[in-house]
Image (spheres, rainbow, N blue to C red):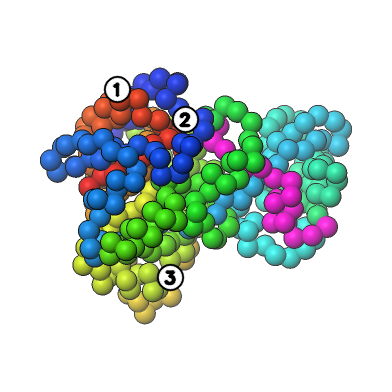
Amino acid sequence: MKLSDFDYNLPKELIAQYPSEKRDGSRLLVLHKDAAVIEHKNFKDMVEYLNLEDMLILNNTKVLPAQLIGRKETGGKIEALILNAAQSSRLKAEGTCEREVLLKPARGCKVGSKIIFGDGELKASVARIENGRRFLKFSCNGNFEKMLDKFGEMPLPPYIKREVTDFDSERYQTVYASKSGAVAAPTAGLHFTKKLLEDISKKGTGLEYVTLHVGYGTFKPVSSEYIKEHKMEKEYFEIERGVIKNIKNREGRIIAVGTTSTRVLEAIDPLAFNLQSSACNGWTDLFIYPGYKFKAVDALLTNFHLPKTTLLMLVAAFCGRDLLFKAYEEAIKEKYRFYSYGDAMLII
């Protein structure tokens, strides 16, 4: 399939710049893939579509404030986005560390160039440049993750055209986020409240958690004319054996919350996983696009995605490209809000 097969036109006013007033106040488009029927609901209504013995799989990754605003030692503002946040979060030693970053502007940032953040408590220098990718060596007076908490901002996606606010520190994070390491939120999970999760559990639907630290590669554009030639960036994942065991023993549907949870489940295939194996974590670059045969996921909750992206291709693989684009046309007609802070779609 070609990249152009996954293009569509979206009015700019439908790109959500802020989340809904309440997390579970978003709209929900329900797509019945076998019957090709579309329903328009509110997000809270998703409980109606869950059954006893179903199992909801959520990604508990926590977004780090990985966007740093600093200045060059020679003068001039510069932005640095920590790309490999998963490794950064596991670094607890004090002193120095080296991390890949995206610099804006990158021009003039040569090996040895020095950058200062905040009042100078956090400093860095360009350690190396490989194939256009820059690596900063950070020097700080304390734990690096604490430095990010102090000087960093939430790394909102580039299509949100406004300044980051304190409000984003809460709303660009799921209520169940617990394992630091992502530079982008698993956005399908942003709609859940603790109360809604309690209601789902009371209904008899299981709740289990996996971890996939979403990297900046989630925004990496597909440049290949033929999509199968695209290479995904690797992202770190973890899943506990107890979760795998519960999935294997479940009687109802496995409902993945988001494309990130989907990729974890499909990367390891818990239904065929040998519980004697020690491989419950690692790095995945699984690329799911139409033609892929799903092994573990029965239903999918997701947001509306950008054109020509791997996220859109994954959803098209799950329900079929033509049906997906029919749903998107309906969502645009009904003025649903799109992308990270937008509305949601449940595919059953």
The residue that mark 2 highlights is: 16
The residue that mark 3 highlights is: 240
Q: Is residue 311 left or right of residue 248?
A: right
Residue 34 location, x and y as percent? Answer: 14, 43
Could you tell which of marks 1 and 2 lies nearer the N-terminus?
2
The residue that mark 1 highlights is: 333
Q: Is residue 88 left or right of residue 227?
A: right
Could you tell which of marks 3 and 1 lies nearer the N-terminus?
3
Q: Are marks 1 and 2 in contact (CB under 8 Å)?
A: no
Q: Which residues are magenta?
A: 141-158
Q: Quadrant of residue 68?
A: top right
Could you tell which of marks 3 and 2 lies nearer the N-terminus?
2
Residue 298 location, x and y as percent? Answer: 24, 54
Q: Quadrant of residue 205?
A: bottom left
Can residue 268 be found in the magenta stretch? no
Kind of element beneath mark 2: loop
Q: Is residue 87 left or right of residue 213?
A: right
The kind of residue on which mark 2 rests is Ala
Kind of element beneath mark 3: loop
Residue 279 location, x and y as percent? Answer: 43, 70
The kind of residue on which mark 1 rests is Lys
